[in-house]
Amino acid sequence: MTLRSAIATLAFLALTGPAFAEGDAAKGEKEFGKCRSCHSIESADAVIVKGGQTGPNLYGVVGRQAGTAEFDRYGEDLIAAGEQGLVWDATTLAEYMQDPRAFLQAYLDDKSARSKMTFKLRKGAEDVAAYLATEAVGAAAPE
């Protein structure tokens, strides 16, 4: 990440961080219905949410480096963001869900960056992110 993109990301987080931090996991569990056409949440032992296979399984997404789950259709730019240090947390997930392409463009400081995820979750992204950050869907326990 360049210094310019780091500053832009920090400024964006400063302006939007409190809203994302206040997500409601119970609402997010219901809102996840919008995501299940493409994503499932499945551990090795259980199916938490049966969903589509167009997008990666979101079990354990919080705390994981972007683009590293077992999935063969990640976009190059999402993989590049992971290689540059992007690790998903509730804040970055909420930002990404609201506008995946704009998020990657800002994170990579590259106006040509693209995301294979074209859906934009304009409302409720912080709630879905809070749900994905729960232990119920495999989020790493806080240390």
Image (cartoon, rainbow, N blue to C red):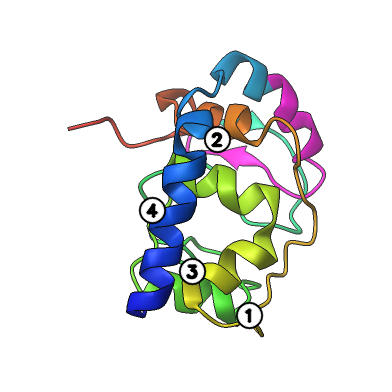
Q: How far apart, in angstroms, are the residues tagged by discs 4 and 3? A: 16 Å
Q: Residue furthest top?
A: 26
Q: Amino acid at mark 3?
A: Tyr
Are circles 2 and 4 on residues that touch, CB within 8 Å?
Answer: no
Q: Are marks 1 and 4 in contact (CB under 8 Å)?
A: no
* Spatial CA span between label 3 and label 1: 9 Å
Q: Which mark is residue 107?
A: 3
Split into 4 quadrants, where in the image is the N terminus?
A: bottom left
Q: Earlier in the sequence, mark 2 or mark 3?
A: 3
Tell me the SS state at disc 3: helix
User: Which of disc 3 and disc 4 is earlier in sequence?
Assistant: 4
Q: Which mark is residue 129?
A: 2
Dot placed on the residue nearer the N-terminal end, 1 or 2: 1
Which badge, 2 or 4, is on the more N-terminal residue?
4
Q: Nearer the viewer, mark 2 or mark 3?
A: 3
Q: Is residue 61 visible?
A: no
Q: Residue at x 74, y 33 (%)?
A: 123
Q: Quadrant of residue 106?
A: bottom right
State yes or no: discs 1 and 2 in contact (Cβ < 8 Å). no
What are the residue bounds of the magenta stretch? Answer: 30-46
Closer to the camera in the image, 83 or 3: 3
Q: Which mark is residue 113?
A: 1
Mark 2: which amino acid?
Ala
Asked whether the beta carbons under mark 3 and mark 1 sit within 8 Å of each other, the answer is yes
**What is the distance, in whole Å, between disc 2 and disc 4 at their CAs?**
13 Å
Q: Residue at x 82, y 44 (%)?
A: 37
The residue carrying mark 4 is: 64
Nearest to viewer (mark 2 / mark 4): 2
Q: Residue at x 57, y 42 (%)?
A: 94
